[in-house]
Amino acid sequence: MAGMADDIKCVLYSEDLIKDTVSVLAERINSDYRDKEPLLVGILKGSFVFMADLIRKIDLKCSVDFMIVSSYGSGRSSTGAVKINKDLSEDIEGRDVILIEDILDSGLTLSYLIKYLQVRKPASIKICTLLDKPARRATDITPDYSGIICPDEFIVGYGLDYSEKYRNLPYIGVLKPEAYT
Ligand code: IMP
Ligand code: MG
């Protein structure tokens, strides 16, 4: 049986580059939230690898929570529909919330989520995304913290999947066309 790496056409972002990027994002959050205790909300599933690395570089008394949303079917293109499969377990009234995303693509998921959460009266809601694909933006949403601006290519690894696979690659790469079956 062939390994996962055989399906990768090229590595776009190495483990080292991702590590440095995560540190830079964490430093910015550390300084912006110096006297605060933010709630970091990981948007699952894609953000779990990034979230795990990011929080270990954050030197604040933060808490974490998760939401499970699905905006994509099993394929590669957005349906535009956002389904909330698991809501927050924390009360966010008066809290400084940071939404943690793997990648901001059309922006439909996050713009929906922000409206959905705003009615609970958090003190603030900010967006932290590892990757940003601005070419595909369909709403006027800009991340407050953004790690890497990426080209308009479908990428996998470091939490990002194609059909629920490749999330466990330690780097981010582009799939070979024949891997889309
Ligand atoms: P948006 O609502 O279009 O911004 O969708 C964001 C979500 O789509 C991300 O959290 C990912 O789960 C998924 N997504 C967007 N682009 C890619 C990609 O290139 N590879 C894997 N998943 C992606
Ligand atoms: Mg996905």
Image (cartoon, helix red, strand yellow):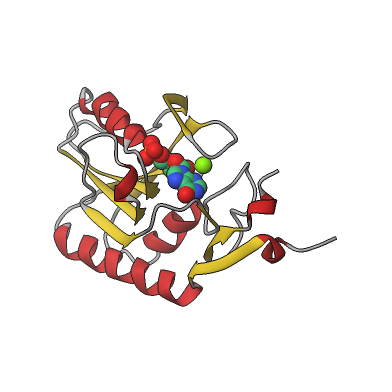
Q: Nearer the viewer, residue 116 or 148?
A: 148
Where residue 43 appears, as percent x and y from the top left, is 42, 41
At x 31% / y 48%, what residue is drawn? 135
Vertically, is 95 above or below 150? Answer: above
Classify residue 56 as left or right of residue 119: right
* Ligand 1 quarter of the rendering: top left
Q: Is 3 in front, or is 35?
A: 3
Residue lying furthest bottom: 16
> In the image, what residue occupies the spot 53% across and 40% down?
76
Residue 95 % position (x, y): 21, 39
Q: Is residue 108 visible?
A: yes
Depth check: 65 or 78 in front?
Answer: 78
Residue furthest toward the front? 177
Can residue 91 be spotted in the picture? no
87 shown above or below 12: above
Q: Residue furthest right?
A: 1
Is residue 3 or residue 62 the one in the foreground?
3
The residue positioned 62% from the left and 54% from the top of the image is 166
